[in-house]
Amino acid sequence: MLRQSVLSLVFGGLIWSPTAQALDTAGAVKATPVLQTSESWDGTALSYPEGEAEISGMIVEIAVGGETGWHLHPVPSFGMVLEGELEVRLRDGKSNRFKAGDTLAEVVNTEHNGRNVGNVPLKLLVFYAGAKGKERTVKSAVP
């Protein structure tokens, strides 16, 4: 139940719009934008995949010092670091760090490796804007 509540709150924040503020004029509801972008964190324009839309979400957990291994996402994905600190590195050496509370639009069709560089287990809430039958994550052939 708690997991559903967290997912609902975070996903609701990810799709925030000015309309959300108009929902409650008495002040009982507060909508705080956490992410609005048309680019991934490395500046690449985002585009939606073809096919029947499918939104999915998960919580990725990485132990202290652990890493995802090199992989790519063929569909747009968006995340929020719930706990810990994440470093994402591209093959060209470009990298970015995200700490608890930070949001990100993940790179698309670009190989990268995520690593927990903090001193607590990392929890990353991720949503994918994919298409039915299309992979969300593809492991790289080259480590």
Image (tube, grey):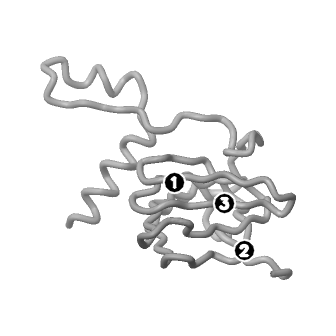
Q: Which amino acid is tagged 2?
A: Val
User: Are the residues tagged 3 and 2 within 8 Å (C-beta)?
Assistant: no
Q: Residue at x 79, y 65 (%)?
A: 111
Percent of width and height locating residue 136: 64, 67
Q: Which amino acid is tagged 3?
A: Val
**From what the image shows, is residue 105 above or below residue 138?**
above
Residue at the spot of label 3: 88
Task: Say whether disc 1 or disc 3 marks the residue closer to the N-terminus.
Answer: 1
Residue at the spot of label 2: 138
Task: Say whether disc 1 or disc 2 marks the residue closer to the N-terminus.
Answer: 1
Residue neighbourhood size for the residue with mark 1, other residues' Cα within 10 Å, grouped as few (<14), some (14–19), many (≥20): many
Q: Nearer the viewer, mark 1 or mark 2?
A: 1
Residue 30 located left or right of residue 36? left
Residue 23 located left or right of residue 92? left
The CA distance from mark 1 to mark 3 is: 12 Å
Residue 106 located left or right of residue 65? right
Q: Quadrant of the C terminus?
A: bottom right
**From what the image shows, is residue 10 above or below residue 74?**
above
Q: Residue at x 45, y 60 (%)?
A: 125
Q: Which structural element holds mark 2?
A: strand
Percent of width and height locating residue 20: 33, 28
**Near-viewer residue (48 or 106):** 106
Q: Nearer the viewer, mark 1 or mark 3?
A: 3
Residue at the spot of label 1: 79
Q: Which structural element holds mark 3?
A: strand
User: Are the residues tagged 1 and 3 within 8 Å (C-beta)?
Assistant: no
Q: Residue at x 74, y 74 (%)?
A: 70
Q: Quadrant of the N terminus?
A: bottom left
The CA distance from mark 3 to mark 2 is: 16 Å
**From what the image shows, is residue 132 above or below residue 49?**
below
Q: Which amino acid is tagged 1?
A: Gly
